[in-house]
Amino acid sequence: MDIGTLQAYAYFGFTAFLVVVLYSYIYHLYSAQKKGTRDYEKYGNIALNDEITDQPVEEISKNDEIK
C-alpha cells in the first residue's frame, strides 16, 4: 500500500466522521427543540435584536445568576 492509497482512505474516513458529527449535531438541535429544553431558532435573531431595550432570548432565573 503506497502513501496515495493511505491518504485516500484517511480522507474518506475523516469525511465520513465529519458527516456523522454533523448529523448528530443536527439531531441534537431538533431533539432539544422538540423536548422544549432550548429553542435555537430564537438565537438566530440575536444579531438583529441587540438593543439594550430588546427582550432577552432567555430569562435568567434566580438560581442561575452570578453572585
Image (cartoon, rainbow, N blue to C red):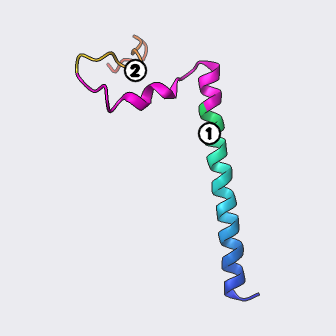
Q: Quadrant of the N terminus?
A: bottom right
Does 47 appear above or below 1? above
Q: In the rendered image, which quarter is residue 37 located in?
A: top right
Q: In the rendered image, which quarter is residue 44 located in?
A: top left
Q: Which residues are magenta?
A: 30-51
Secondary structure beneath label 2:
loop
The reply to whether callout 2 and callout 1 are in contact (CB within 8 Å) is no
Does residue 42 belong to the magenta stretch?
yes
Q: Residue at x 40, y 20 (%)?
A: 57
**In the drawing, does residue 49 fall left or right of residue 40?**
left
Amino acid at circle 2? Val
Q: Residue at x 42, y 12 (%)?
A: 61
Residue under numbered circle 1: 26
Residue under numbered circle 2: 57
CA gap between label 2 and label 1 equals 21 Å
**In the drawing, does residue 23 fall left or right of residue 1?**
left
Instruction: Tell me the number on the disc at residue 12.
Output: none
Q: Residue furthest left?
A: 52
Does 27 appear above or below 58? below
Q: Position of residue 7 (x, y in %)?
A: 66, 78
Q: Residue at x 66, y 45 (%)?
A: 23
Secondary structure beneath label 1:
helix
Does 6 appear above or below 30? below
